[in-house]
Image (tube, grey):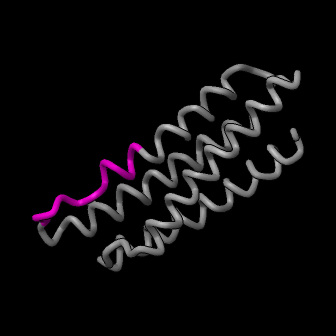
Amino acid sequence: MVSLHELLARTLELYALVLGAWGVYLYFRSHAVNGAFRASFLLMGGLTLFQGLLGAVAFAGGSRPHTLLHLVYGIFAVLFIPGVYLYAQPPKAAKAGSARREAVLLAGAAWIVLIAYFRGVSTG
């Protein structure tokens, strides 16, 4: 269980890196966030939740992280991703700048959660 938790953690780091770069590309090209990007962002959130559940099972089975700060990074990521996603959704009567706003918020969230993943792995 712990090996799968570690493997998924490394995979999520790479996933967040790619998603962050993709979002930055959309922002600088002034492109709207499309359904593929949103789905990828939500998939990252789902995988993060699954990662947390694997960690919880490992914790219940007796495996402990080196420091409890590891848990804080995981809980942060699980709550932060859907929170930013909901915040970034443009209102129905959105102006033209809202496409760039959503891109920068979701790209920024991917970079921030990448840092949380990295810190989680390093404290694990």
In the rendered image, the quadrant that contains the N terminus is: top right
Q: Residue at x 88, y 21 (%)?
A: 62
Q: Is residue 99 above or below residue 117?
A: below
Residue 43 located left or right of residue 122: left
Q: Residue at x 58, y 56 (%)?
A: 44
Q: Is residue 119 above or below residue 106?
A: above
Region in magenta: 83-94
Q: Residue at x 64, y 62 (%)?
A: 15
Of 97 and 74, the residue lying toward us: 74
| Residue 100 colored in magenta in the image | no
Residue 66 located left or right of residue 110: right
Where residue 117 appears, as percent x and y from the top left, is 65, 44
In the rendered image, the quadrant that contains the C terminus is: top right
Where residue 87 appears, as percent x and y from the top left, is 30, 48
Q: Residue at x 31, y 61 (%)?
A: 102
Where residue 90 appears, as percent x and y from the top left, is 23, 60
| Residue 92 colored in magenta in the image | yes
